[in-house]
Image (cartoon, rainbow, N blue to C red):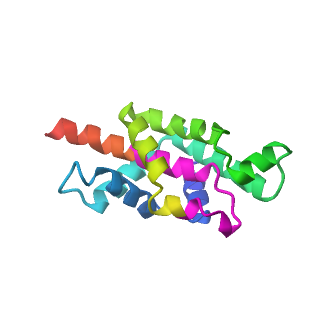
């Protein structure tokens, strides 16, 4: 299952490095000696969790079905537009954030509003791709990896 989740992320244009860049963006202010390899390591650890893999596979599948118009109305239009009041995409993402504690909620909310890096690309509707779920999943993985990093640093210092 982990292998499939990783393959699906790659097929949708998301790399571990892309997510690690988000972790670095979230944590560089708090960890002056932080490097991208440490961020990548924490992303890898988050993706290794079964709950995270389940969210990745579910969200990507729903995005693909939406692109293929294999979702019925009115849900199809809601997912194609990524309507702000829909919220189920964020709820799925929060299942990832929950894995590493409450600090992830603030990280997730912040990065979801800022949309740096890969999140900006995933939110570009002109690509013809649907990333209604994927953008939130990627942000949640970054938030969870940031939380993991923060918890580990707290134990070291």
State the extent of the magenta-drawn residues as a range. 121-144
The quadrant where residue 148 appears? top left
- Front-most of residues 43 and 139: 139
Q: Is residue 85 left or right of residue 101?
A: right
At 61% from the left and 62% from the top, the residue drawn is: 12
| Residue 79, position as x, y percentages in the image | 73, 48
Q: Magenta segment: does it hold 135?
A: yes
Indicate whether 118 appears above or below 156.
below
- Furthest residue in direction bottom, as rendered: 127
Q: Is residue 35 left or right of residue 82?
A: left
The quadrant where residue 68 appears? bottom right
At 42% from the left and 45% from the top, the residue drawn is: 110
Q: Is residue 12 left or right of residue 70?
A: left
- Furthest residue in direction left, as rendered: 157
| Residue 144, position as x, y percentages in the image | 41, 42
| Residue 49, position as x, y percentages in the image | 48, 41
- Front-most of residues 19 and 110: 110
Indicate whether 105 appears above or below 114.
above
Tag count in the figure? Answer: 0
Which quarter of the image is occupied by the C terminus? top left
Indicate whether 97 appears above or below 9.
above
In this view of the protein, can residue 23 be seen by the observer?
Answer: yes
Q: Looking at the magenta stretch, what is its main secondary structure?
A: helix
| Residue 105, position as x, y percentages in the image | 43, 36
Q: Magenta segment: does it hold 1?
A: no
At 57% from the left and 58% from the top, the residue drawn is: 9
At 44% from the left and 59% from the top, the residue drawn is: 116
Indicate whether 34 appears above or below 51.
below
In this view of the protein, can residue 47 be seen by the observer?
Answer: no
């Amino acid at each position: 299952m982990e292998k499939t989740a990783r393959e699906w992320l790659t097929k949708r244009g998301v790399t571990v490095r892309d997510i690690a860049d988000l972790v670095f963006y979230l944590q560089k202010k708090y960890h002056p000696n932080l490097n991208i390899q440490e961020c990548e390591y924490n992303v890898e650890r988050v993706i290794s969790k079964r709950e995270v893999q389940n969210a990745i596979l579910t969200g990507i599948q729903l995005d693909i079905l939406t692109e293929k118009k294999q979702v019925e109305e009115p849900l199809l239009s809601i997912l194609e537009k990524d309507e702000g009041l829909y919220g189920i995409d964020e709820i799925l993402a929060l299942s990832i954030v929950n894995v590493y504690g409450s600090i992830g909620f603030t990280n997730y909310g912040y990065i979801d509003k800022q949309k740096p890096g890969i999140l900006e690309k995933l939110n570009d509707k002109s690509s013809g791709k649907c990333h209604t779920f994927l953008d939130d999943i990627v942000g949640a993985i970054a938030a969870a990896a940031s939380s993991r990093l923060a918890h580990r640093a707290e134990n070291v210092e």
